[in-house]
Image (cartoon, rainbow, N blue to C red):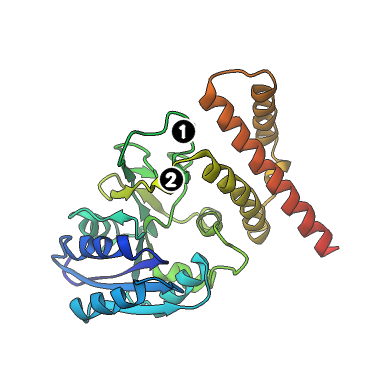
Amino acid sequence: MSGFAIDVVLRTHNRADMLEAAVESLFAADRTGIALRLLLVDNASSDETPRLVARLAERHAPLLVPLREEKPGGQHALNCAIAHASAPVIAFFDDDERVPPGWLQAIAREMDGTQTVFVTGPCRPLWEGAQPPWLPDGYGGVLGIIDYGEQRLRFYRDFGGMLTQGNCALRRQVFERTGPYPAQLTTAEDRWLNAWLEAEGAEGYYCPQMAVLHLMQPDRLNKRYFRRWAMREGRDRAVADALAGMPGLLRQRWYMKQLLDAAATLLLRRGGAKSRFRAELDLRQAWANLRESLARRAGSG
């Protein structure tokens, strides 16, 4: 793995309290045989972040490349970083995550001298307190919790998981082919990219050794945050499907059955509080998806 080059992208917005620990965790990781650069994008921060980025860039020069993107939005920050990438592999993690010592080596094992196009791994939670008792099954991803188990799995063949920007690495050629993330995507960058990778039949793997640790932010551990997320996710799912040329969710028979089950769960008060909250979130997503789909149809007419 001598000379394996990788650019790591880290985007941040007004999280000066978390950023330094995230950066230091990356530079503390085992870099043996790896040529590393960190592309650190300050996405229009107004707190202490710009000054902190400058200090970190001085501390880790020339391995840390400071960037500034004035357009707020994750898609714009990602496009800024990717435009400055030069390594054949680009990896991503978030400012509320911590990279374990073996993260870079896990990426190198998967992608150095192989045909693998992309790889991802678990995002395991660091709870400050107890897990909320109302957190529905299947909704851990809202908090950045991703874990498909301890077996290496091939995407689109062994399981139906989705690559997430919180912990992944891809060949730079992917972005040369897709072009920049569409500006319309406010939160669905992962879904849009995943649809492209699946349509291309790209070879990708879930690697349990490529885990990161994800801080659970207290301001997200409430039902209000989940309800807002559900509306945003439903809207952005409609946008991502339209941009990818895929049939909308509301045209899928399995999805309609899921919505009928959710409606029955609420109307008949079936199951416990977790089941009913999951049903509520499912229906909120569907409503936002329908509203966006109808708006796009009216706009195109």
The structure residue drawn at horizontal position 58% and vertical position 26%, both measured from the top left corner, is 276
Q: 168 and 274: which one is in front? A: 274
Does residue 253 lie above or below 270 as drawn?
below
- Which picture quadrant has residue 4? bottom left
Element type where label 2 sits in the image: helix
Q: Give residue 266's position: percent from left, percent from top.
A: 66, 25
Q: 163 and 97: which one is in front? A: 97
Judged left or right of residue 251, residue 100 is: left
The structure residue drawn at horizontal position 42% and vertical position 57%, both measured from the top left corner, is 165
Q: Reading the chain from its start, which is encountered first: label 2 or label 1?
A: 1
Image quadrant occupied by the N terminus: bottom left
Residue 144 visible in the snapshot: no
The amino acid at mark 1 is Leu
The structure residue drawn at horizontal position 60% and vertical position 37%, both measured from the top left corner, is 281
Q: Number of callouts in the render?
A: 2
Image quadrant occupied by the C terminus: bottom right
Q: For the residue carrying disc 2, how many other residues have a C-alpha within 10 Å: few (<14), some (14-19), or many (20+)?
A: some
Residue position marked by numbered label 2 in the rendering: 143
Q: Determine the residue located farthest toward the left in the rendered image.
A: 32
Q: Give residue 211's position: percent from left, percent from top.
A: 28, 48
Q: Give residue 288's position: percent from left, percent from top.
A: 69, 47
Element type where label 1 sits in the image: loop
Judged left or right of residue 145, residue 58 is: left
The structure residue drawn at horizontal position 53% and vertical position 24%, both measured from the top left corner, is 273
Q: For the residue carrying disc 1, how many other residues have a C-alpha within 10 Å: few (<14), some (14-19), or many (20+)?
A: many
**Are the residues tagged 2 and 1 within 8 Å (C-beta)?**
yes
Q: Give residue 293's position: percent from left, percent from top.
A: 74, 52
Does residue 248 lie above or below 179 as drawn?
above
Residue position marked by numbered label 1 in the rendering: 135
Residue 107 visible in the snapshot: yes
- Which picture quadrant has residue 40? bottom left
Image mark for residue 151: none
